[in-house]
Image: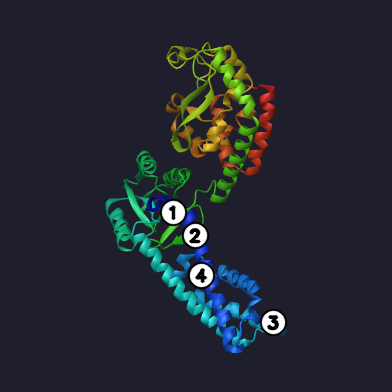
Amino acid sequence: MRTTLKRLFSTDAPRRFLSIVILALMDAAAMLAGLAAAAYMTEGKTGGILYLAPVLLAVWVSVFAAYDLYNRARVRRNPGALLGAGLAWAGLLVVGGAIYPESGLTTGMVLLAVLIALLLDGALRILYEQAVELLYRQGLGRIPTVIVGDGAGRTRVRRMMEQTSSAHACVAEVDLGEGKVDLFELRAALDRTGARGVILVGGERLPEEELLDLLRSVRLRGARMRFVPGALTLMRSQPTISQSLGLPLIEVRYPRLDNTQRLMKRLLDVTVSALALALLAPLLLAVAILVRTTSPGPVLFRQKRAGADEEVFICLMFRSMHEDAGLRQSELEILNEAEGAAFKIREDPRVTPFGRFLRRWSLDELPQLVNVLKGDMSLVGPRPLPLRDFERMGEPHKRRLAAVPGMTGLWQISGRSNLPFEEMVRLDLFYIENWSLSFDVKIILRTLGAVLRREGAY
C-alpha cells in the first residue's frame, strides 16, 4: 500500500487533483452543516431550506474557486481569502433572498449559516494541512526531486526540504559549475531516479540558451522545473509562485509546448495508434507471416534510436533486410548516397525482395504504432535516427531532438529520402517552432497521399 501511494502521488497532477477533490468535499460538508444548523436555530426545522442545497452548494464552490481557494499555496499565503469568499457567498444569498422571498433565505439565517460554515471549514482545512504534513513526514506523497546548483545552494535547499516537511524529496543532485549544467549528468539522474521535479539554484548564472536546453530536458522527461528566485530575467514564460518548500519557488514552462498542448497531442497519438492497430491487425499478421517465410530471421527488427532529448529507445519495424545487415554496415559506408549524418543507399544489397516491397509502401514502419502507444514516439514529429547517424550529427542539428520523434513529419510529405540531411533538419525545426494540433492532422492526411505516391521510399 505504501509503495502504491508513493507511485501514485510522485507527480503533481494526481496530487493536485486529489487535493482539489478533498477541499471541495470539505467545503461542501461545511456549507451544508452551516446551512442546516442556521435553519434549525432560526426556524426550528431544516427541511424547508435544504431543497435549495444543490443550488447553494454550486454557488459556494464556484465562489471558492473564483477566490482560488483550491490552490493550497495561495490559502497559506492569504487565509483572509476564505473569509472574503464566505462573505461574497452570503452577499449573493441575501440578494437572492430579497428577490425571491419564497426561498426563506433571511439575512439573519444567511449570516449565521456563513459564520458556522466558515468556522467549520477553517477547522477542516487546518486538519487537512496537518494530515498532509504527517504524510510528508512519513515519506508518502513526496515528489522525487533533483536539485541543480552549486554546493552551498544545494545544501540550503536540501536543508529546507528536511526541516519543513516539504512536498519534495531530494533523490539526486547535479552541480552547477562555471555557468553550465552537465546535461548528460542531469538526464542520467532523471532517468535513474524517475524524478518528477527539478529545483534550480543559481540559475541567473546560466546563459539563456543553456537555460532553455535545461528546461527542455526536464520537460521532455515529464518533470516540472522550479527556480529559486534570481533567474527572472532569463524566463520566457509566465512564472507561477510556489511555497511548497518553505521558500518562494518560481515554476516555468518550456515555451514551445505547454501541458495542455502536450496532453492534446498525446490523446491524438493514443487514440489513432490504438484504433490503427485494431483495424490493421489482419494486415499486420499477414506481413509478419510473409517476413518470416520469405527470409530467415526474426519478424521484427529492433533498433536503438535517439529520441526526445537524446533519450535512447528501441524502435520497432518489420525486418526488411537480411539477418546480417548490421554486420555489413561498415563495408557499405563508402556507398552511402545521403548527405550529412544520414546513411542511405538506393539499391541497398542488404534489403530482401519482400523487404523492398515493404519499404516501397512504408509497411515496414507499421509496428512503430506500438512505440506511439507506449509514448516512445508520436504520430508526427522529427524522424528518430539510428545511433550511428545521431553520433555524427553536429550540436546545431541536435536541436531537432526538442520534440518526441514521429512516425511521420514534414520530411515524409516533402520527399523523404530524396531530401538532403540539412533540409530534413530545417523542416524538423520548423515543425517544432510551429506545432499545433491542426498541423499534426494536416501532416497525417498528407502522409497518406505521400505513401500512395511512394515518394522517396526505398
State which quadrant residue 266 falls in. top right
Secondary-structure class at tag 4 = helix
Question: x, y percentage for residue 22?
Answer: 50, 64
- What residue type is disc 3 on? Ser
Residue at disc 2, secondary structure: helix
**Position in image of residue 267 (x %, y %):** 59, 44
Q: Nearer the viewer, residue 300 or 362?
A: 300
Q: CA distance from mark 4 to mark 1?
A: 20 Å
Whole-percent x, y for residue 179 in the image: 35, 46
Q: What secondary structure is found at the residue carrying circle 3? A: helix
Give the residue pinned by disc 3: 103
* Disc on the earlier residue, 4 or 1: 1
Q: Which amino acid, mark 4?
A: Met
Mark closer to the chain start, 2 or 1 = 1
Q: Which mark is residue 26?
A: 4
Helix, strand or loop at mark 1: loop
Identity of the residue drawn at 36% across and 60% down: 136
**Residue 457 visible at all:** no
Q: Which residue occupies the foreground of this view, 76 or 134?
A: 134
Residue nearer the viewer, 401 or 420 = 401
- Cβ atoms under marks 2 and 1 closer than 8 Å: yes
The disc placed on residue 9 is 1
Left or right for 289, reference 103: left
On the question of residue 101 being in view, the answer is: yes
Q: CA distance from mark 3 to mark 4?
A: 25 Å
Sequence-wise first label, 2 or 4: 2
- Mark 2, residue position: 18
Q: Earlier in the sequence, mark 2 or mark 3?
A: 2
Q: Residue placed at 44% from the left, 35% from the top?
A: 310
Q: Is residue 391 above or below residue 254?
A: above
